Amino acid sequence: MVGRFLDKKHVPLVNLSATSDESNRSAEDDEKKRRRKVSNRESARRSRMRKRRHLNELWSMLVHLINENKCLVDELSRANEGYEDVVEENKKLREENSKLRKMIGEIGF
């Protein structure tokens, strides 16, 4: 009977049970790894989609801000032109005021 256990074809039942448990654990581990891989892939896909959406939102915001900036620059340019016109008109009015005061002074009022 001792020789029978040394023969590679005959494995003691105790070892069969241990091998079966290890095989089940290995299969469970493989399944866990597979599920984790699938979960990680899905998580990465969602992350890429969020990143893509965020990038699209940033591009939209950039276009909007560029347009808004152009409008504000145009408005500022018009305001500056208006300011220069007012300064020129003010200068003319002051000169005219000065001339009129001089004329009034010469008349003797």
Image (cartoon, rainbow, N blue to C red):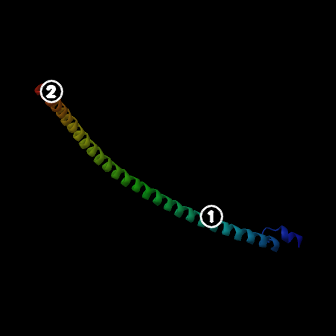
Give neighbour class at mark 1: few <14, some 14-19, many 20+ (Cα, 10 Å). few
State which quadrant residue 76 falls in.
Answer: top left
Q: Return the x and y of residue 72 as percentages of the image width and height.
A: 30, 46
Residue 48 vs residue 13, the one in the foreground: 48
In the drawing, does residue 2 fall left or right of residue 25? Answer: right
Q: Return the x and y of residue 39 as percentages of the image width and height.
A: 56, 65
Residue sitting farthest toward the front: 109
Give neighbour class at mark 2: few <14, some 14-19, many 20+ (Cα, 10 Å). few
In the drawing, does residue 78 fall left or right of residue 69? Answer: left
Mark 2 or mark 1, earlier in chain: 1
In the drawing, does residue 25 fall left or right of residue 59? Answer: right
On screen, residue 62 above or below 103: below
Quadrant location of the C terminus in the rendered image = top left
Q: Return the x and y of residue 69 as percentages of the image width and height.
A: 32, 47
Amino acid of disc 1: Lys
Badge 1 marks a residue whose secondary structure is: helix
State which mark lies toward you, 2 or 1: 2
Residue sitting farthest toward the right: 2
- The residue at which mark 2 appears reads as 105
Residue 53 vs residue 91, the one in the foreground: 91
State which quadrant residue 1 falls in.
Answer: bottom right
Amino acid of disc 2: Gly
Q: Return the x and y of residue 23 as percentages of the image width and height.
A: 71, 69
Q: Is residue 12 visible?
A: no
- The residue at which mark 1 appears reads as 33
Residue 63 vs residue 39, the one in the foreground: 63
Badge 2 marks a residue whose secondary structure is: helix
State which quadrant residue 6 falls in.
Answer: bottom right
